[in-house]
Image (tube, helix red, strand yellow):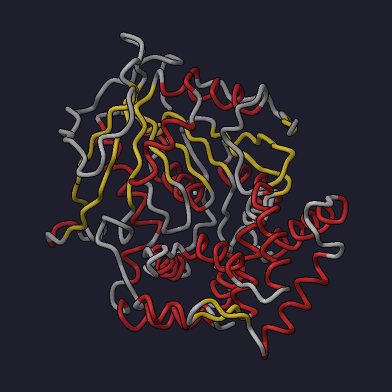
C-alpha cells in the first residue's frame, strides 16, 4: 500500500521462425468489424469497431462471467496491394488510459512506413472507458478530493469500498490475457505491440506469459514493477522540474526568474488564500498537479510559465487548465474514469509479483528510454531490458514522457526497421533531439 500511495502522489499530480517483414498468417478468421458509432474519420483512414468478450477471471473462465472490451481499428485505404504485415496493437498506459478514442490520431501520428504495412488497433482495457468502466466517486466528489493533499488516498479508499471483492480482476496479469484475446480477434498468429508507460508493463507481462505468440514489441517509457526498482518515481519529476527551472531562467518568455521559488511561494499562499475559479479552489494540491502535468512534455513548459505568472496575479484559470488535462475533466465538469481505473489496477498489482519477466523463446524487444522522462525515469529502461533478457535499449536524449515517433532521422528509422523487418537497433544506439 505504501508503494502505491507514493506512486499516486507523483503520478496523479500512454518468435519462433518468421521471415522478417513477411505477412502474419492468420490463426483464425478475424472478427467482423462494423462501422463505428462515432464520426467516420478522415479521408484516407477507414475506422471500424468491434466489441469482444473476455473472461472476468481468466483463472476461472468456466463460470461464464465476462467483460466486454471495446476495440477500434484504423486502416489506411491506400495501403500498397499485398504489402500488409498485420495489425499493430497499442496501449497508451496510465494504467487506465483509453486507447479506443485515440486510434485515428495514432494512425495519423505514426510514420507512413508503419501504416502502409499495419492496421492500427486501440482498445479500452477492462474497467476503462467503454469496457465496463469502474467509477469510485461522483464528479463533485472528485472536485473536492483533488483539491486536498490526500486526494489520491481518498479516491483509493472509495474504490476499495466499492470494489473490495473484485479488485484482483483488474490486475495486469488479467489484462495480459485479454491482450492475447485481442491478438486472436484481429486474426494474427503473433502479436505486434506498441506500449507506452504502463503499457510497457502490460507488454512485458504478455511477453513473459506468451513468448511464442509475440512477433515484436516496442516498449516506450519503461514502467518497472516495484520489486525491480523501489526507487520513488518522484526522482524523475524532480529532475524534470530542475530542467524546467533552468529553461525558465534563460527564456525571457517564461517570465519566472526562479521557477522553483515561485512555485513554493504560490503554494504557501494557497494554503490559506487559494485563488478561485467559480466554486473551485487552486489549492497547493491543484498547483502540484498542474506543475507535474506540464513536466510530462517540454511543449507544455510555456503554458506552465504563463499559468504560474497568472496565478501570482490571482487568476487560477491556467493552473486548472493544466490540472484538468491530467485529471481528464472536461469543460462541463465531467471526469473520465481514468483515475478510478488507475487506482484499481495499481491496487490489484500490489498483490502480484512481476519481478520475473524473463522471455524464453520469444523475440528481441525494443525498450525506449528518454533521458528527461519524469514519469518513467531513464534508469528504468535497462532494468526492464535486463529483466526481459531479450530487451534492447534504445535511448532518446531529450525531454518528456515517452518518445516514439519523433519524425526524425534516428529514432523513427530505428523503431520502424524493427517493426517492419524484425531488425532491432544496434546495442548502444542513442538518438538526440535536434
Residue reaching furthest to the top: 81
Using the image, determine if residue 21 lies above or below residue 30: above
Residue 215 or 128: which is nearer the viewer? 128
Q: Residue at x 27, y 33 (%)?
A: 47
Q: Quadrant of residue 233?
A: bottom right
Image coordinates of residue 186 in percent, x first then y, are 26, 33
Residue 228 or 223: which is nearer the viewer? 223
Image coordinates of residue 30 in percent, x first then y, are 20, 30
Q: Residue at x 35, y 41 (%)?
A: 122
Q: Residue at x 62, y 49 (%)?
A: 401
Using the image, determine if residue 381 lies above or below residue 374: above
Image coordinates of residue 128 in percent, x first then y, are 33, 59
235 vs 415, left or right, is: right
Image coordinates of residue 105 in percent, x first then y, are 42, 37
Quadrant including the C terminus:
top right
Q: Residue at x 72, y 30 (%)?
A: 431
Using the image, determine if residue 405 lies above or below residue 378: above
Residue 1 or 363: which is nearer the viewer? 1
Residue 220 or 407: which is nearer the viewer? 407
141 vs 131, left or right, is: right
236 vs 86, left or right, is: right
Amino acid at each position: 500500500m505504501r508503494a502505491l500511495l507514493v506512486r499516486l502522489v507523483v503520478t496523479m499530480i500512454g518468435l519462433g521462425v518468421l521471415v522478417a517483414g513477411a505477412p502474419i498468417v492468420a490463426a483464425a478468421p478475424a472478427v467482423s468489424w462494423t462501422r463505428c458509432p462515432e464520426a467516420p474519420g478522415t479521408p484516407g483512414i477507414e475506422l471500424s469497431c468491434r466489441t469482444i468478450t473476455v473472461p472476468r477471471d481468466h483463472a476461472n473462465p468456466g463460470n461464464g462471467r465476462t467483460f466486454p472490451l471495446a476495440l477500434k481499428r484504423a486502416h489506411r485505404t491506400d495501403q500498397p496491394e499485398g504489402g500488409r504485415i498485420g495489425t499493430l496493437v497499442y496501449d497508451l498506459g496510465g494504467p487506465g488510459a483509453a486507447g479506443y478514442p485515440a486510434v485515428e490520431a495514432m494512425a495519423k501520428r505514426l510514420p507512413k512506413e508503419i501504416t502502409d504495412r499495419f492496421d492500427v488497433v486501440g482498445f479500452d482495457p477492462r474497467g476503462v472507458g467503454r469496457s465496463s468502466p469502474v467509477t469510485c466517486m461522483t464528479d463533485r466528489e472528485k472536485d473536492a478530493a483533488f483539491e486536498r493533499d490526500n486526494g489520491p488516498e481518498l479516491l483509493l479508499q472509495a474504490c476499495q469500498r466499492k470494489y473490495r471483492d473484485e479488485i484482483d480482476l483488474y490486475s495486469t496479469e488479467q489484462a495480459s490475457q485479454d491482450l492475447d484475446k485481442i491478438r486472436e480477434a484481429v486474426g494474427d498468429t503473433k502479436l505486434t505491440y506498441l506500449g507506452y508507460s504502463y503499457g510497457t508493463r502490460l507488454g512485458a507481462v504478455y511477453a513473459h506469459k506468451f513468448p511464442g505468440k509475440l512477433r515484436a514489441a516496442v516498449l516506450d517509457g519503461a514502467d518497472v514493477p516495484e520489486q525491480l526498482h523501489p526507487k520513488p518515481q518522484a526522482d524523475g519529476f524532480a529532475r524534470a522540474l530542475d530542467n524546467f527551472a533552468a529553461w525558465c531562467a534563460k527564456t525571457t518568455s517564461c517570465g519566472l526568474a526562479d521557477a522553483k521559488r515561485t512555485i513554493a511561494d504560490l503554494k504557501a499562499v494557497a494554503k490559506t488564500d487559494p485563488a478561485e475559479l467559480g466554486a473551485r479552489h487552486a489549492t497547493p494540491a491543484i498547483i502540484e498537479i498542474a506543475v507535474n502535468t506540464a513536466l510530462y512534455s517540454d511543449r507544455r513548459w510555456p503554458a506552465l510559465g504563463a499559468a504560474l505568472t497568472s496565478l501570482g496575479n490571482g487568476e487560477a484559470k491556467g493552473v486548472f487548465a493544466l490540472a484538468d488535462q491530467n485529471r481528464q475533466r472536461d469543460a462541463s465538469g465531467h471526469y473520465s474514469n481514468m483515475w478510478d481505473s488507475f487506482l484499481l489496477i495499481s491496487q490489484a498489482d500490489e498483490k502480484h509479483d512481476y519481478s520475473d519477466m524473463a522471455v524464453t523463446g520469444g523475440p528481441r524487444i525494443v525498450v525506449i528510454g528518454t533521458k528527461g522522462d519524469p514519469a518513467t525515469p531513464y534508469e528504468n529502461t535497462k532494468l526492464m531490458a535486463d529483466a526481459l533478457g531479450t530487451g534492447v535499449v534504445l535511448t532518446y536524449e531529450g525531454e518528456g514522457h515517452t518518445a516514439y515517433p519523433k519524425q526524425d532521422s534516428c529514432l523513427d528509422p530505428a523503431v520502424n526497421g524493427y517493426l517492419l523487418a524484425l531488425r532491432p537497433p544496434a546495442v548502444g544506439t542513442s538518438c538526440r533531439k535536434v
